[in-house]
């Protein structure tokens, strides 16, 4: 099983401190919603005040009822004292008022804080996606697709839960402080005992939180691996079934799911330990406190009513205290997710504009590769090994040669999707390394063998070539690509959805949509990477006709395996082992009886054999 790990920025083995992550979370995302959070804080204060008032209210009710119970009216009649009447009239109102204030405050706080958390999540996802679009192709491809998807889906959900709990924690903290004030009011010595006992027993919870953060980070990273594995299995279903690889994939899935189970169990068991540990620690602390309370009553420091109210306050204290103690575990998981989110946001593209880079501005463009060397990674074989060739403005230049010779790399370097190690690539004698990326890529239109279409309408996919184009320009481009007729025959015309990856269209239809997009872009350089290789004869004929129309007046660099499709090219460049070994027009290369002639003879000999084979 291949070990697929995230390659974007962050090292999960050396996480940033919780304090620095919390500070950045506040400065960059939460602070922009501080207005609604201020109102939420006021609601939390009302919630804490109403909760803290309950023990005081109970003490008043208890004392009043005790006085009423001890009073005797004349003739030994049932007690109808003023204290009892006050409880009858004011007691239910007091409790109801505290309950209403408490409930409304909780709702307002939850609505505003959750809204702020969700808005912050939206902002993070926007920042992540914006930065993802800015990264280089190599950086994006180094990251497994499942990892990227996980950063946009799983990690924000975990962080949202943390932010929601943090908002509740502020209310819990205010409630805890209010109840602590009540306890100090009754007996400050006993309160000090409570603080010391609970503080001494709190260290296991902090230790558990650290282990939870590490386990959660590993679980989140493995979620990306799982998504990538399932995505590969779904995308490669045809190959898996054709080669009867179901059992192999099931075995691999077993390993992936077993690892998922191991990590999930680890985090689940740590979470399961968290609550019982808090409960046991609380029980130990309560046992100690009750013993001290008994001593304080014996010394006369407390009376029975105060004792009851103190214990009520202590019991009520357990809810916000437990919330705050479990917050550590949730926060560690959330900050681990935030680190993974920041890994995308903080990633910086390696290919950037030089300072004060001028814009490339050319109506027609010549292209020149001058002794270009390039490899995809340090220590790997050179994909281009001294590549040199030229394409004059308006020429069609075909790149031919065996697979892996470096032909597709040439097109990628021309668009500066990658940067060569040595040599220069020039357009109109201007080194493309010195011009702005935006202007360079606006001069190149690219059509690949497997044209990629977005899950949108036909109109939207064509308009990608020029987002400002009106319907008339889109129709002209579609007609130039021989696509207008089949588009109009579709169920919704130009508003017909193409499906995921263009799955609702045939291969030939997808290619013609891609060609229409390239035509609409109206760039002086057209790059074609085996644009007809996967098509049947009828579809290829229509696409070739469209290509001839679209490439007219443009500098066209075309990669082709079928040599019959490039015989009319102005120049054919034979590429072997990353270098140009021969170039010239079709007739001259055949007459030279060199590398091209051998390729041509081999290809047509294979075609003849196929025709003769019964």
Image (tube, rainbow, N blue to C red):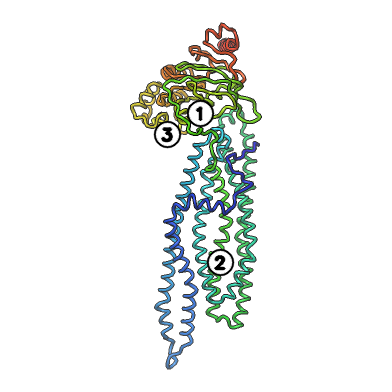
Instruction: Give the image location of residue 100, x and y in percent.
Output: 41, 67
Q: Which residue is mark 3?
A: 456
Please name the residue shown 53% across and 26% down the image.
Answer: 412
Bin the neighbour count of mark 3 within 10 Å (Cα to Cα): few under 14, some 14-19, many 20 and up: some
Is residue 412 positioned above or below 584 on the image? Answer: below
Q: Where does label 2 land, which residue? A: 318
Task: Depth check: give the residue in front, 434 or 240.
Answer: 434
Locate residue 209: give its quadrant: bottom right
Q: Is residue 503 visible?
A: no
Q: What secondary structure is marked by label 1?
A: helix
Work out how far the residue at label 1 is from the one at label 2, CA to CA, in angstroms. Answer: 65 Å
Residue 14 visible in the displayed image: yes
Mark 1 or 3, which is nearer the eye? Answer: 1
Q: Would residue 339 be found to the left or right of residue 396 on screen?
A: right
Who comes first in sequence, dot 1 or dot 2?
Answer: 2
Place of residue 244 in the rendered image (x, y in percent of width and height, measured from the top left): 61, 30
Mark closer to the chain start, 3 or 2:
2
Q: Pick the residue in front: 481 or 11.
A: 11
Q: Quadrant of the N terminus?
A: top right
Residues packed near mark 2 inside 10 Å, few (<14), some (14 to 19) or many (20 plus): some
Report the residue that reaches farthest toward the top. Answer: 591
Label 1 crowding class (10 Å Cα cut-off): few <14, some 14-19, many 20+?
some
Please state, as top left, top right, bottom left or bottom right, where the C terminus lies in the image: top right
Residue 575: x %, y % from top left: 58, 17
Q: Determine the secondary structure under disc 2.
A: helix
Q: What secondary structure is marked by label 3? A: loop
- Give whichever of discs 1 and 3 has the lower sequence position: 1
Q: Which mark is residue 207?
A: none
Q: Is residue 134 above or below residue 582?
A: below
Reading the image, the residue beneath label 1 is 434
Q: Look at discs 1 and 2 and give the one toward the viewer.
A: 1
């Amino acid at each position: 099983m291949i070990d697929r790990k995230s390659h974007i920025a962050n090292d999960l083995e050396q996480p940033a401190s919780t304090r620095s992550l919390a500070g950045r979370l506040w400065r960059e995302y939460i602070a922009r919603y501080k207005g609604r959070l201020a109102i939420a804080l006021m609601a939390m204060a009302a919630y804490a005040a109403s909760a803290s008032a309950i023990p005081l209210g109970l003490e008043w009710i208890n004392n009043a009822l005790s006085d009423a119970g001890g009073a005797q009216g004349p003739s030994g009649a049932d007690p109808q004292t003023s204290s009892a009447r006050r409880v009858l009239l004011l007691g239910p109102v007091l409790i109801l008022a505290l309950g209403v204030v408490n409930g409304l405050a909780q709702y307002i706080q939850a609505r505003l804080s959750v809204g702020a958390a969700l808005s912050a999540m939206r902002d993070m996802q926007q920042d992540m996606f914006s930065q993802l679009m800015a990264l280089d192709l190599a950086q994006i491809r180094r990251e497994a697709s499942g990892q990227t998807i996980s950063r946009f889906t799983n990690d924000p959900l975990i962080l949202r839960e943390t932010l929601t709990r943090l908002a509740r924690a502020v209310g819990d903290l205010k409630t805890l402080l209010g109840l602590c004030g009540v306890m100090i009011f009754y007996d400050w010595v006993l309160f000090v005992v409570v603080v010391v006992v609970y503080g001494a027993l709190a260290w296991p919870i902090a230790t558990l939180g650290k282990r939870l953060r590490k386990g959660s980070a590993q679980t989140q990273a493995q979620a990306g691996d799982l998504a990538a594995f399932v995505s590969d299995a779904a995308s490669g279903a045809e190959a898996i079934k054709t080669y009867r690889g179901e059992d192999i994939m099931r075995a691999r899935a077993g390993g992936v799911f077993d690892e998922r189970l191991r990590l999930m169990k680890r985090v689940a068991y740590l979470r399961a330990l968290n609550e019982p540990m808090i409960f046991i620690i609380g029980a130990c602390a309560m046992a100690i406190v009750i013993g001290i309370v008994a001593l304080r009553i014996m010394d006369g420091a407390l009376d029975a009513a105060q004792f009851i109210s103190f214990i009520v306050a202590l019991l009520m204290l357990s809810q916000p205290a437990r919330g705050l103690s479990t917050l550590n575990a949730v926060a560690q998981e959330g900050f681990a997710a935030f680190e993974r989110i920041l890994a995308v946001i903080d990633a910086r593209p390696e290919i950037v504009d030089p300072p004060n880079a001028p814009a490339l501005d050319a109506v027609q463009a010549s292209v020149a590769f001058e002794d270009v060397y390039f490899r995809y990674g340090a220590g790997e074989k050179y994909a281009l090994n001294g590549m040199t060739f030229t394409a004059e403005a308006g020429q069609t230049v075909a790149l031919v040669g065996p697979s892996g010779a470096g032909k597709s790399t040439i097109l990628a370097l021309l668009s500066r999707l990658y940067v060569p190690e040595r040599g220069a690539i020039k357009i109109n004698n201007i080194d493309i390394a010195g011009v702005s990326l935006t202007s360079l890529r606006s001069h190149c239109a690219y059509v690949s063998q497997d044209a990629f279409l977005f899950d949108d309408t036909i109109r939207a996919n064509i308009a990608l070539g020029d987002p400002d184009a009106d319907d008339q320009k889109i129709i002209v481009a579609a007609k130039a690509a021989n696509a207008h007729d089949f588009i109009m025959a579709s169920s919704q015309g130009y508003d017909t959805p193409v499906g995921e990856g263009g799955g609702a269209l045939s291969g030939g239809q997808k290619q013609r949509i891609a060609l229409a997009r390239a035509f609409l872009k109206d760039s002086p350089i057209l790059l074609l990477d085996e644009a007809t290789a996967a098509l049947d004869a009828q579809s290829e004929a229509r696409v070739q006709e469209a290509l001839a129309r679209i490439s007219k007046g443009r500098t066209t660099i075309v990669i082709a395996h079928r040599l019959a499709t490039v015989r009319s090219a102005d120049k054919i460049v034979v590429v072997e082992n990353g270098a140009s070994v021969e170039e010239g027009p079709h007739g001259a290369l055949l007459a030279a009886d060199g590398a091209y002639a051998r390729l041509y003879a081999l290809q047509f000999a294979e075609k003849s054999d196929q025709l003769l084979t019964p």
